[in-house]
Image (cartoon, grey):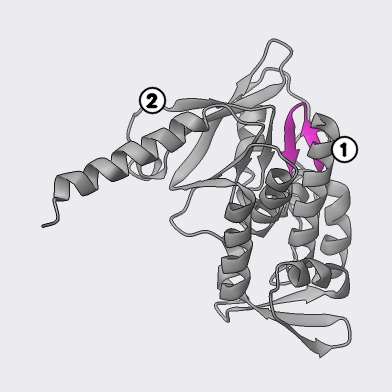
Amino acid sequence: MLDETIISKAIIKTYSEDLIDYLHSDVIIAGAGPAGLVASKYLAASGLKTVLFERKLSIGGGMLGGGMMFNKIVVQEEAKRILDSYQIATKEFEKGYYTADAIESVGKLTAQAIDAGVKIFNLIFLEDVKIDKDNRVIGAVVNWTSTDMANLHVDPLAFESKCVVDATGHELDVVSVVLEKVPNAKLNTPSGGIEGERSMNAEIGEKLLLDTTKEVYPGLYVAGMAANAASGGQRMGPIFGGMLLSGEKVAKLIIEDLK
């Protein structure tokens, strides 16, 4: 006979153990879109303890929706090697343009991140950051997504890390918090503030993305669409090569900085 209270105890106990285990990590990533997923895999595979918080119930960010809910994505030649490394099937549509199934892509990006050692918590968002005496980002302050949706006053919990990655996409949640709450904060952007994303231009946006993927504030990195939103790059639409390459680049930057 199955005992419902044992089922409940199993869930509560093991989930709580995971939370406690990740109160201290090397890298915290906000946003489990393609850039965050790729970055997390490479970071964990390098031996860095990596935790990924996703605001939504689902994983994959904008990749799941493909283009206007046609669940296909496109990658360019430069990024195809990343999909190949995940054994994600691609088809050449025209020279230099490759299509892939959005569901397969998200599934394999997620599974291989977990296999590499990444811990993913969904339905949790970063509402603040931890700052040390030198104004360096050294962790995240998180809460349940449901408390934000219901506008409930519930105090958050703090997680410590050596750095944080904002991969929250267009919303740029973490960088926005730093500018709002850290006195006289200046970003590594042309104006020192958030430049904001520009209108769609895939050619320019994809090229800019590797330049805008960087440490934008001490201890805080940006990747994916959050990088272009921080530094004034164009949005790219349903071509995802830049997202994958941005995740790879931010991981390399952090590995170099921490190791």
Residue 247, how many percent across, how many down?
A: 75, 53
Task: Judge left or right: residue 19 versus residue 100.
Answer: left
**Where the N terminus falls, by quadrant?**
bottom left
Q: Residue at x 58, y 79 (%)?
A: 71
- Can you tell which quarter of the image residue 24 is in? top right
* 220 over 95 or under it: above or below: above
Within 10 Å of the Cα at label 1, are there few (<14), some (14-19), or many (20+) other Cα atoms? few
Residue type for callout 2: Asp
- Of badges 2 and 1, the one in the foreground is 2
- Prevailing secondary structure class for the magenta stretch in the rendered image: strand
Q: Residue at x 49, y 48 (%)?
A: 55
Based on the picture, tell me whether residue 246 belongs to the magenta stretch: no
The numbered dot on residue 155 is 2
Report the front residue among 237 and 104: 104
Residue 105, how many percent across, how many down?
A: 63, 71
* 84 over 37 or under it: above or below: below
Residue type for callout 1: Pro
Q: Going from the N terminus, do you reach mark 2 or mark 1 first?
A: 2
Mark 2, secondary structure of its residue = loop
Based on the picture, tell me whether residue 218 belongs to the magenta stretch: yes
Work out which residue is located at the far left of the displayed protein and give it. Answer: 1
Name the residue beneath numbered marker 1. Answer: 190
Residue 183, how many percent across, how many down?
A: 68, 17
- Can you tell which quarter of the image residue 112 is in? bottom right
Q: Residue at x 73, y 77 (%)?
A: 74
Report the front residue among 99 and 65: 99
Magenta region: which residues?
214-223
